[in-house]
Image (cartoon, helix red, strand yellow):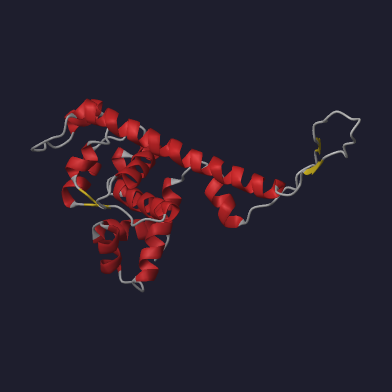
Amino acid sequence: MRERGDDALLLFRKFAADFAEKYRMPAIQLMDDARQMLLAFPWPGNVRQLKNITEQISIIETNREITAAILQGYLPTQNTQRLPALLGRREGKGFESEREILYSVLFDMRQEVSELKKMVHNLMAERGAQVVTTPVMTSQQAPMPAIIHPVKPTVCEDDDDDIQDTEEYVEETLSLDEVEKEMIRKALDKHHGKRKSAAKDLNISERTLYRKIKEYGLD
């Protein structure tokens, strides 16, 4: 992905929009210094690594405008020697470790919430399903424990929203060209074919946009 220039910015914007919709929060945006850092990073993990880092930032950061200082805290420390120097740089390895721990805790919390929702639905389905009967006692009989007749619980099907909230997020194999083509097409539609406005919206140069339009046959 390193050789594809502005593609990293396009992918970051797409992932940020996707996670904003998924977690129902405003999308994060890169400031100018963060954009330069994103482009300078070699991305050894390719598209999947960029996607994972975008998700971490979307969940953890309360400030939706991401600076280079913030972004650097999420990038692997072994590659930071290739990045532009920053004043007031955060403690690298320790800070990254704290980020990973916090991200892990947040992920576990989402899993627990999903499990709690399933438990609530199961309890509601079983409500009133068990019938408890107590035998009639006579003066000659000793007390006997109540007899519980188990009844098979009714399965309650969740609606689409519940399923979406509880199902495990499945990673899909990404096609870089398809993502780019779709984002460019949407930007052109949004600005009624005005390439200058579309390029500005995509944070790429007009020259790059023209090349991509010809490459994907969007002219």
For the point 16% across and 34% down, the residue is 90
User: Residue 68, relative to residue 188: is it above or below?
Assistant: above
204 sits left or right of 55 in the view: left
Q: In which quarter of the image is residue 183?
A: bottom left
- In this figure, what is the number of numbered marks? 0
User: Residue 9, relative to residue 109: is it above or below?
Assistant: below
For the point 66% across and 45% down, the residue is 122
115 sits left or right of 36 in the view: right
For the point 36% across and 74% down, the residue is 192
| Relative depth, front residue between 209 and 39 | 39
Residue positioned most to the left: 87
174 sits left or right of 97 in the view: right
Q: Quadrant of residue 49?
A: top left
- Counting from the top left corner in percent of width and height, residue 133 is at 82, 42
Query: Where, quadrant-wise, is the C terminus in this rendering?
Result: bottom left
| Relative depth, front residue between 165 and 191 | 165
178 sits left or right of 127 in the view: left
- Counting from the top left corner in percent of width and height, residue 105 is at 39, 34
Q: In which quarter of the image is residue 116?
A: top right
- Counting from the top left corner in percent of width and height, residue 143 is at 82, 30
Residue positioned most to the front: 139
Query: Is residue 33 in view from this perspective?
Result: yes
Query: Is residue 44 in view from this perspective?
Result: no
- Counting from the top left corner in percent of width and height, residue 52 is at 38, 39
Query: Where, quadrant-wise, is the N terminus in this rendering?
Result: top left
| Relative depth, front residue between 178 and 23 | 23
